[in-house]
Image (cartoon, rainbow, N blue to C red):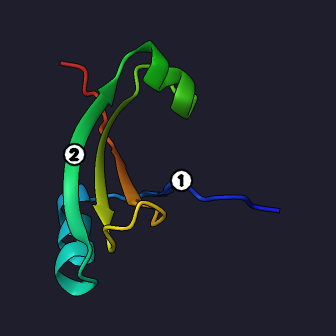
Amino acid sequence: MVGRIYHVGLTVSDLDRSIAFYNEILGLEFQGEIMMTGEETDKLFQRKNCKARVAYLNGSKAVEAPPIELIQFVELRKL
């Protein structure tokens, strides 16, 4: 039995386009964006040298309403 959902995470290929869709089309409010890197991020996503842009949107101000978490993995390019 599920007691509570704290957030819903979705992996996307284009974070900016996805933010626009969820905000402009579905009406969810953009709450902010963070960049995740480092050892803890590698462990969380089970990837080496992981870098992820993560944005949060929500359709309700109620504490019980879980935000949508959009995750775009950023590829690190070797020069």
Looking at the rendered structure, the kind of residue marked 2 is Glu
Q: Quadrant of residue 38?
A: top left
Under tag 2, what secondary structure?
strand
Q: How many numbered discs sit on the rendered protein? A: 2
Location of the N terminus (image quadrant): bottom right
Mark 2 surroundings: few (<14), some (14-19) or many (≥20) residues within 10 A? some
Residue extending furthest top?
39
Q: Distance between the residues labelled 2 and 1?
A: 17 Å
**On the picture, is 34 further left or further right than 12?**
left
User: Contact (CB < 8 A) between labels 2 and 1?
Assistant: no
Q: Residue furthest bottom?
A: 25
Looking at the picture, how far across and down is residue 22, in whole percent?
27, 74
Q: Is residue 22 above or below residue 66?
A: below
Identify the residue shown where x is 25% and y is 34%: 35
- Give the secondary structure at mark 1: loop
The amino acid pointed to by label 1 is: Tyr
Pick whichever of labels 2 and 1 is earlier in the sequence. 1
Quarter of the image where the C terminus is located: top left
Q: In this view, does 65 lie to the left or right of 56?
A: right
Q: Position of residue 2 (x, y in %)?
A: 75, 61
Residue ID for mark 2 = 33
Residue 20 placement: quadrant: bottom left
Check the image and report above or below for 62 versus 74: below
Residue that badge 1 annotates: 6
Image height of 13 relative to 34, above or below: below
- Residue 34 spot, x, y in % from top left: 24, 38
Horizontally, residue 3 falls left or right of residue 28, namely: right
Residue at image point 23% right, 81% down:
27
Give the residue drawn at x 40%, y 60%. Answer: 67
Q: Residue 69 carries which label?
A: none
Q: How crowded is mark 1: few (under 14 residues within 10 Å), some or many (20 or more)?
A: few
Foreground mark, 2 or 1? 1
